Image: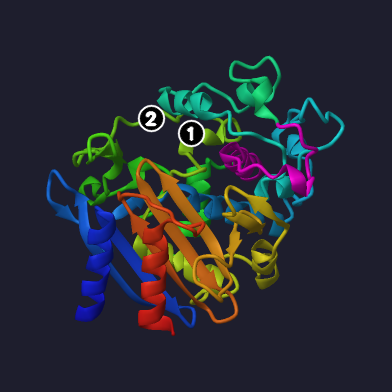
Amino acid sequence: MKSLDERVQQVLDKHRIVGLAASVINEGKQIWSAGYGWANVERCIPVTTQTVFRIASISKTVVATAIMQLVENGHCGIDQDVGDILGFPVRSPKHPNIPITLKQIMTHTSGLQDEYVRFVVDSRSENPPKTRLADILLPGGTYYTDNLWGDGQPGDPGCFEYSNLGAVILATVVERLSNERFDEYCKRHLFEPLQMNETSFHIGDLKDMDSVAVLYEYSEVDDRFIVGTDDFRGKKPDAIDYSGYVPGTNGALFSPQGGLRTNVDDLTRFLEAHTNAGKLNRVQILKPETVDLMHSPHWSGHRRDGFFRNCGLQFLITDDLISGHRLIGHSGDAYGLLSGMYFHKQEKWGFILLMNGLIQKKEQGVYFEAEEELARLLHAAFLK
């Protein structure tokens, strides 16, 4: 282990990784986890396996899992018109007769573009919240723009466009069907059953704000790291008054597209459940056939410099991270954080990487060098 720590430290030094939490599973069970570097540079708080990270787009796999629980329970179908669930029409003005389905949203083939940032920022800034999802999806809404939809026909594999707004829609669907706030649904039906006790889409649920990693963005101009987000200085932000909020109004309130906060050991439990056909110990969060459906390719193509080649239901399928191995999972990249959660379906091994700041460099690969080097290092150390 001393040799492994030394090699990990070499990668941290090479890419100036501020902090790293990592874990490895083998035969469907966690066999190792560790923390390196700093969760908070200014306050000299080190990363441990209990450090809480805002994990960015890995969050989408949790959103999809919640959706598929509701599909299993008969509340909806993946080919259902999402507008029928939300109670207002959701249609591309360029293809008004084609319904937008849950499957299209989960495979990024709905035609939705990522013209959503002002809507999400304003949704998160109101206290109490008033903005509705309809305000961005309905023509004439405050946040609606003609750039919201691409030219491609919804459902056409050729119109793949990675959409964060899609995750917001899915979270609102979860609320609409369950009549529970999105963060509370996930807590009750996913995090508590899996004993993910330090995990939430709601910052108010976190017990120890000193455990939250600050995310650092590298400034090439200044050759230094600056705070991207989550510099709470040990204090919770002012509480949002949700007392008048009606579930199904606006899932953006809980940043389902990237705002899940969790530690590496908690997230590993979620990974174990997906690796083991939806089951962790005696807890079954999804049926095996549902998990297989989520992990199977529903879209194939070539997008974003080769990064997206095969997509399941909000799960990325890649052959590019570790040569010779097809992996299923998701990555995250926001506010300086770089994250990855991947597993090998047949052999039941996998790993998680959570980095709260680094110099991001690519050469020929579709992943950043730091991701590739760490993934291959852990694979060689534990899994070969």
- Report the amino acid beneath label 2: Ile
Work out which quarter of the rendered image holds the C terminus and state it: bottom left
**What are the residue bounds of the magenta stretch?**
150-178
* Quadrant including the N terminus: bottom left
Q: Is 124 situated above or below 288?
A: above
Nearer the N terminus, badge 1 or badge 2? 2
In the rendered structure, find residue 253 and report the number of the disc placed on it: 1
**Does residue 295 appear to the left or right of 42 in the view shown?**
right
Residue 257: image location, x then y, percent:
52, 43
Percent across and percent down for residue 83 are: 75, 34
Q: Residue at x 49, y 49 (%)?
A: 57
User: Residue 379 location in percent, x, y?
Assistant: 41, 77
The residue closer to the viewer here, 352 or 221, is 221
Give the colour scheme of this rendering. rainbow
Q: Where residue 259 appears, x then y in whole percent?
A: 43, 43
Q: Residues within 10 Å of mark 1 (few under 14, many from 20)?
A: many
How packed mark 2 is, by other alpha carbons closer than 10 Å (few <14, some 14-19, many 20 or more), is some
